[in-house]
Image (cartoon, rainbow, N blue to C red):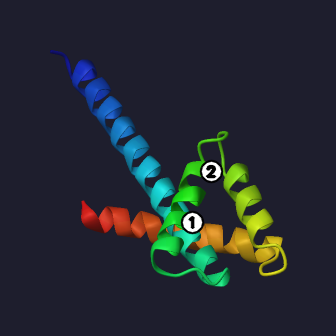
Amino acid sequence: MTTFDDRERAHEAKFAHDAELNFKAEARRNRLLGEWAAGLLGKTGDDARAYALTVVTSDFDEPGDEDVFRKLAADLEGKADEETIRAKMVELRATAREQIISEI
């Protein structure tokens, strides 16, 4: 093996690890968003967990965050504006990433 091959494998392993971390953080963020939105909608217990799951699955509609945003904006109409939802998405992304990293 050459040093170049070793570096290439290390780079590929880091890329795979980072991609997995980002996927987990995104899913965790969506669950946290769902729990936050459920609270605004007055949902508790199993209803809140079920609602959070719908937010997580809404992220499979298309790449990016807009599918999640549209779901939340529609569900929270009159309860939270666009700025509040987008700020919460950023805030909970950081929270989710910290949680995932701390579990490793």
Q: Secondary structure at mark 1?
A: helix
Circle 2: is it few (<14), some (14-19), or many (20+) Cα within 10 Å? Answer: some
Q: Residue at x 58, y 69 (%)?
A: 33
Residue that badge 2 annotates: 58
Q: Quadrant of residue 98?
A: bottom left
Q: Tell me the mark number nearer the camera, choosing from 2 and 1.
A: 1
Direction from residue 10 to residue 45 in the image, left or right: right
Label at residue 51: 1
Q: Residue at x 59, y 42 (%)?
A: 60
Disc 2 to disc 1, C-alpha distance: 11 Å
Circle 1: is it few (<14), some (14-19), or many (20+) Cα within 10 Å? Answer: some
Residue 17 x, y percent position in the rendering: 33, 42
Q: Residue at x 33, y 63 (%)?
A: 101
Quarter of the image that includes the C terminus = bottom left
Quarter of the image that includes the N terminus = top left
Q: Nearer the viewer, residue 37 or 64?
A: 37
Labels 2 and 1: the sequence-earlier one: 1
Q: Residue at x 48, y 69 (%)?
A: 49
Q: Amino acid at mark 2?
A: Ser
Residue 12 x, y percent position in the rendering: 34, 30
